[in-house]
Amino acid sequence: MDASTRYSFVNRPRIYLDYAATTPIDPEVWQSMSEHALHLSGNPSSIHAEGRAARTAIEEARKSVAKMLHASLNEVFFTSCGTESNNTILLGAVRDLQVTRIISSPIEHHCILHALEYLKTQYPVEIVYLPVTTTGQPDLERLEMLLADRPGPGTLVSLMQVNNEIGSMIDLNVVGNLVHQYGALFHSDTVQAIGFVDHDLTQLPVDFLSGSAHKFYGPKGVGFMYIRNDYTIRPLLYGGSQERNMRSGTENILGILGMARAMELAMANLDERQNHMQQMKSRLASGLLEHVPGLTINGHPSATSPKILSVNIPAGPRTDLLLMNLDIAGISASGGSACSSGVESASHVLAHLPITSTDKTVRFSFSHLTTGAEIDQVIEKVTRLTQKNQPEPAPDGNQ
Ligand code: PLP
């Protein structure tokens, strides 16, 4: 892609490789949002013309999202983020669907893990965490044993489709069919997958899933949840009964429209974007493997998202501050995942992988906007920063 047509997200020439944390808003999405901002000023709950125009716009967005997911209109609910969607689903399953056991994994996002720990203190629900394989996937043999031991709809299985730290993926068909074979319910946190993978919910054996616009070049602060028609749960928020009583609060109209537009663009360019990210990921992986002795890659070699590359770099004199040094060098990456406090802390995901404790783990995550030249610069910089005895060049470029 020509540089002039690329988004200005950070002040280039910085190199942003943290697209799993968040993505820049697509200019086309922003343009459509800003056009609507000037015209759609009614409250969608009002019955007058301004209100009806806002309501129509939201329902058009819902139609579009539902169509892309091959879901019914009444199965899609707009929320404020992926966290809210996942929390609503987990709470609803326990409180309203008589779920007394949730089987999940210890490498889920904190919005799952912390919600599960909370539910355990408030409801009579057993939480079971599956062991994780060395390639960062939940142990499906153990899952089957647990399901066979106590089949039926009293169990919800909650497993993420793409792990946000290491990129490993589960096959929703395989897991969902297994879960349904034993009559249990299946929720997948698909926040890192929506907009990057096709989801045909007429075929996929999934009962609940979640999406978040800021992961696929939409605005921040808006998401959605899919709840299969067979299930009725109560909301997290009570009030004006918006979203068919599933999510009270005046709708984030512009956010919803922006999310639908971003998802349309993502789905229209799915293959092209996936192929490009895969090329970027392979280029970085092979470059780093060639130049950084002892470097290893986390996650599954093939069941992995083209968006994420997580690498372990053996300890050296300058690896402790590697992320900071990369930042100073104009490269944004992350250690494991973005952490809400902005502080690098030990990763609960990496703790379950066979990584030498002194290794430095770095997560690079890619976009269709990433260029080969950027990847080459990152390879060069990481190589330089991890070479044991070589001094760092002065910031002005003098060696
Ligand atoms: N689930 C996964 C896998 C994520 O990566 C994230 C965000 O990093 C979330 C859920 C939370 O999404 P949001 O930021 O929209 O609350």
Image (cartoon, rainbow, N blue to C red):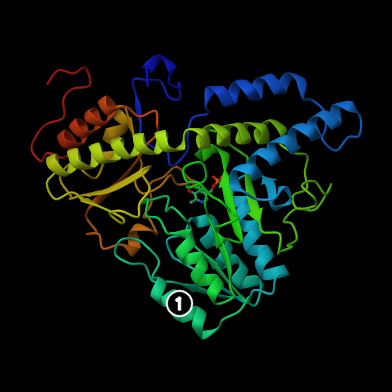
Look at the picture and state if 136 lies above or below 126.
Answer: above
Q: Is residue 195 visible?
A: yes
x and y, in percent, of residue 333 in the image: 34, 38
x and y, in percent, of residue 169 in the image: 40, 55
Q: Image quadrant for the N terminus? A: top left
x and y, in percent, of residue 62 in the image: 70, 41
Look at the picture and state if 93 lies above or below 154.
Answer: above
Amino acid on which disc 1 is placed: Glu
Q: Nearer the viewer, residue 172 or 91?
A: 172
Count of marks, rendered view: 1
Q: Nearer the viewer, residue 57 or 82?
A: 57
| Residue shown at 40% from the left, 31% from the top | 368
Q: Residues within 10 Å of mark 1 (few under 14, many from 20)?
A: some
Look at the picture and state if 216 lies above or below 374.
Answer: below
Q: Image quadrant for the C terminus? A: top left
> Which residue does the numbered mark 1 point to in the structure image?
144
x and y, in percent, of residue 120 in the image: 59, 72
State whether label 1 is within 8 Å of ligand 1: no
Location of residue 137 (image quadrant): bottom left
Q: Name the residue furthest bottom.
A: 149
Location of residue 301 (image quadrant): bottom left
| Residue shown at 40% from the left, 59% from the top | 348
| Residue shown at 41% from the left, 20% from the top | 11
Q: Is residue 80 visible?
A: no
Q: Name the residue furthest front.
A: 203
